[in-house]
Structures are given as C-alpha cells and as structure tokens.
Amino acid sequence: MYAWLDRHVGETMRKFIIAMMAMLFGGAIYILWRSDTLLMFTWFDVMGIRDHVLSLQSFAKPCYAVLPHWVLYSLPQALWLFSGIVAFSCIWGKEDALNRSLWSTIFAVTALGFELGQFLDIIPGHFDKWDMVSMFLALAVACFVCALENRCERCKCK
C-alpha cells in the first residue's frame, strides 16, 4: 500500500512540477519581453519591484530580436492553458473525473473564449489566429499528458 501511495504522490508531483514550470516559463516571457504597459506592471509598482523587473528586461532585451513572434505572443497563453489543465488533473486526479473534466472544460472554454471574444470585438485586445492554434495544441498536449498517466496505470508500465 505504501508503494502505491509513494508512486501516486510521485506521479502527481511530477505533473504538478511540469504544470508550474510551464506557468513560470510563460510568465517569464511576459515579464522579460512584453510591454510594460500591461496591467501586471502596475502590480509590480504596487509591490515595489518594478525597477527590478525593468532591470531584468534590460538584461534580456538582446534576446528579443532572435525570438520568433509566436514565442513572444502566442506561447505564453498556450503554456498558461497547458499548466491549468495539468494542474486540474493534479488537484482532482483520477478519482474525481467529473470535477476534473468540469473545471478543465471551463478553463479551456474561458481561454479560447477570450480569444474568440477579441475576434468578435466583444473583448478588448488583438485577435491572433496563432494564439488559437497554440492553445489548441496546448490542450492536445495537456490531454495527452493526462491520458498517458491513465494508460500507464492500466497497463502497469510505470
């Protein structure tokens, strides 16, 4: 029984670490290479760390010219979506498929809905078809990661 618990906690922790790394990487892209007119920079002012963030941006600025457009503008959303779906899988696991599916669906529909809302001029912002493509790819990879765990549990290949 303890071996099962150790293995289960290990699997969940691995997925959680992957989810958090994706979120942190997407956040780093925003912090390092996106415009300081974004709302989060106001938060950095409130926290008293804006100067530190601007120093990081200055340090990272040379990389901006070599990074593809999709990395700067589409990848962060995709990573955020991937992170959320995998995190929900960690929170509810295999035991509560209804809540896992419900919250994952709400999260995905919200993410895709905001981009669609930009296309329809309902939500402020700039619609980008590559944002939609990257988010659908992120959904597919997240579902694959979560399904792989279930497949391996059935065939005992872990």
Image (cartoon, rainbow, N blue to C red):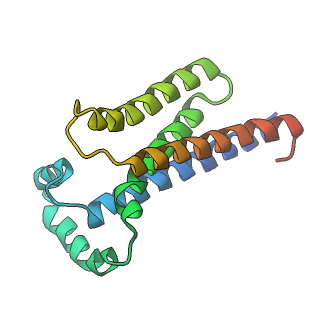
Percent position (x, y) of residue 6? 73, 43
In the rendered structure, the answer to whether residue 30 lies left or right of residue 99 reads left
Pick the quarter of the image with the N terminus: top right
Whether residue 149 is situated above or below residue 18 in the rendered picture:
above
In the rendered structure, the answer to whether residue 109 lies left or right of residue 58 reads right
Q: Residue at x 59, y 34 (%)?
A: 89
Residue extending farthest top: 98
Whether residue 16 is situated above or below residue 104 in the rendered picture:
below
Q: Can see residue 16?
A: yes
Percent position (x, y) of residue 43? 16, 49
Percent position (x, y) of residue 100? 57, 26
In the rendered structure, the answer to whether residue 9 lies left or right of residue 2 reads left
Residue extending farthest bottom: 62
Whether residue 103 is situated above or below residue 31 in the rendered picture:
above
Q: Can see residue 5?
A: no
Specify the quadrant of the image occupied by residue 67.
bottom left
Q: Residue at x 42, y 56 (%)?
A: 75
Q: Residue at x 12, y 57 (%)?
A: 48
Q: Residue at x 66, y 44 (%)?
A: 145
- Return the residue nearer the eye: 17 or 40: 40
